[in-house]
């Protein structure tokens, strides 16, 4: 009985620092949890499918993605039970709906990224920017919706602290970041430095602080 009591006291002590949900190892994202698989730099694209059992929305991608990353924001689509989405970008002209386009709707037309989702299953098939924006011309996609392998693996984790705003206990954040680090991913509370530099360059060019021809 003494050993059981000690174990329970020890669990209570641990939970003072980490919420029970973290002790139970919540999923960051399936592509991160089980170890990141290296992608194929020569992959030329493929198809994405929604989760409907039939009459699936099909989106054809004409190239691999870039800047693939785990994202903790509240807007991106996440698989059930995951704290993060994994989303990458590619040129918008390389993204085409090739089956059941009538099932597509825009989740929020006022958002900077207009996420085009299946009306029935809710899966986000692609996000497109239509207004003036540093990333206009790039579409955002979730390559886990593909039935083929070789897509670029996650490169970093962005908007990590945003999961707190969605109800994740702040005491668990160190463990989340450590888990990303263990998988070789840097954690940021915005985007990666390269993407933040791109945004800042765009802003400086728009304001005339930098030449439009760098």
Image: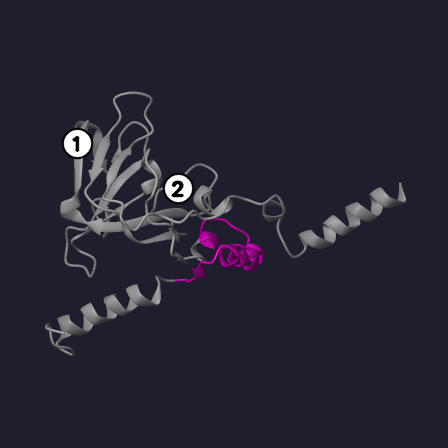
Which mark is drawn over residue 147? Answer: none
User: Which residue range is magenta in the image?
Assistant: 163-189
Q: What scheme was used to colour the molecule? A: one colour
Can residue 202 be seen from the camera position used here?
yes
Q: Residue at x 25, y 38 (%)?
A: 46
Q: Residue at x 25, y 22 (%)?
A: 55
Can residue 116 be seen from the camera position used here?
no
| Residue 74 magenta-highlighted | no
Q: Disc 1 designates what residue?
A: 98
Please rate how many residues cluster around mark 2, counting C-alpha atoms within 10 Å: few if below 14, some from 14 to 19, many from 20: many
**Image location (x, y in percent) of residue 65:** 27, 49
206 shown above or below 123: below
Mark 1 or mark 2: whose residue is earlier in sequence: 2
**Image location (x, y in percent) of residue 106:** 22, 39
Q: Quadrant of the C terminus?
A: bottom left
User: Is disc 1 placed on a helix, strand or loop?
Assistant: strand
User: Is disc 2 placed on a helix, strand or loop?
Assistant: loop
**Image location (x, y in percent) of residue 144:** 36, 39
Report which quarter residue 79 is drawn in: top left
Can you name the residue that lies furthest to the right here?
A: 2
74 shown above or below 123: below
Q: Considering depth in this image, is 177 or 206 the residue closer to the camera?
A: 177
Please rate how many residues cluster around mark 1, counting C-alpha atoms within 10 Å: few if below 14, some from 14 to 19, many from 20: few
Report which quarter residue 117 is drawn in: top left
Q: Disc 2 designates what residue?
A: 78
| Residue 174 magenta-highlighted | yes
201 shown above or below 182: below
Q: Residue at x 44, y 57 (%)?
A: 160
Q: Considering depth in this image, is 58 or 210 the residue closer to the camera?
A: 58
């Amino acid at each position: 009985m003494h050993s059981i009591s000690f174990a329970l006291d020890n669990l209570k002590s641990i939970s003072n620092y980490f919420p029970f949900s973290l002790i139970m190892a919540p999923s960051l994202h399936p592509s991160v949890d089980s170890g990141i698989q290296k992608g194929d730099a020569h992959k030329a694209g493929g198809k994405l499918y929604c989760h409907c059992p039939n009459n699936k929305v099909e989106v054809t991608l004409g190239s691999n993605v870039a800047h693939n990353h785990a994202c903790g924001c509240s807007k991106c689509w996440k698989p059930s039970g995951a704290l993060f989405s994994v989303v990458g970008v590619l040129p918008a002209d390389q993204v085409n709906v090739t089956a059941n386009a009538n099932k597509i709707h825009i989740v929020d037309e006022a958002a900077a990224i207009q996420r085009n989702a299946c009306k029935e299953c809710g899966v986000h098939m692609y996000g497109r920017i239509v207004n003036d924006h540093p990333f206009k011309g790039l579409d955002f996609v979730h390559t886990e919706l593909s039935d083929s392998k070789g897509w670029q693996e996650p490169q970093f984790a962005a908007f990590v602290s945003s999961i707190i705003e969605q109800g994740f206990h702040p005491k668990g954040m160190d463990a989340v970041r450590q888990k990303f680090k263990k998988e070789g991913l840097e954690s940021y509370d915005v985007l990666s430095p390269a993407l933040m530099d791109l945004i800042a360059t765009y802003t400086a060019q728009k304001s005339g602080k930098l030449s439009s021809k760098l």
